[in-house]
Image (cartoon, rainbow, N blue to C red):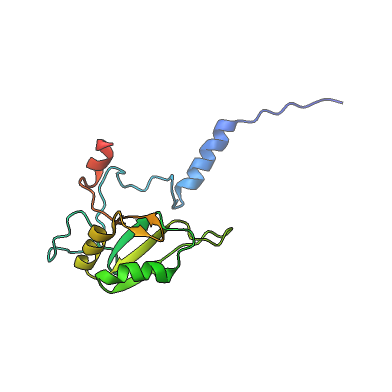
Amino acid sequence: MSKQIQFIDRDADRNAMDLDLGNRTRRGRGFNSGRDPRESVEYETYDQSDVNTGRAQKSVQGYVIIATNIHPEASEEDVLDAFADFGPVSNIHLNLDRRSGFVKGYALVEYAQFAHAKKAVAQMNGTELLEQIISVDFAFSKSSVKGLDRVAAD
């Protein structure tokens, strides 16, 4: 019995695979899309030239403020009663912990108009709600530096 030794040329296999993949369009992350990754991308923005909002950024439906240090046993009605004094509340989110069923400690309150949200932030920040001092601020804020300059600044 004679044994036969066979050599495998792996470089030829790789070259054949490269030729085969060259005919296909590859999509997804990690493939060269032909676009310079440092190139800035234009995103849709909201025109807010009619109102001076300072650092507050408008979301899709209105101005969202976040209240932290909310008592775990607070209800939506408690938070709504506190924030409804400053204007009509468009939406309110009081997220619950799945395991305990209690409030996670924050609330998101949405106003349609900037003036109402600003008044709520100014007057509710540092006030007491259900025996706890809450902190209130805008949930979305404008960045001072845009685009790639922000990455370079970090």
Task: Give the percent coordinates (x, y) of residue 54.
Answer: 17, 55
Q: Note whether residue 57 is visible.
A: no
Q: Is residue 5 left or right of residue 65?
A: right
Q: Residue at x 28, y 56 (%)?
A: 125
- Please identify the quarter of the rendering in which residue 66 is found: bottom left
Q: Is residue 103 left or right of residue 144?
A: right
Q: How many marks?
A: 0
Q: Note whether residue 35 is visible.
A: yes
Task: Give the percent coordinates (x, y) of residue 82.
Answer: 33, 67
Task: Give the percent coordinates (x, y) of residue 109.
Answer: 34, 65
In the image, residue 136 sits, relative to residue 37, either above or below, namely: below
Q: Residue at x 24, y 37 (%)?
A: 153
Which quadrant holds the C terminus?
Answer: top left
Q: Nearer the viewer, residue 33 or 124?
A: 124
Task: Give the percent coordinates (x, y) of residue 41.
Answer: 26, 52
Q: Residue at x 20, y 53 (%)?
A: 55
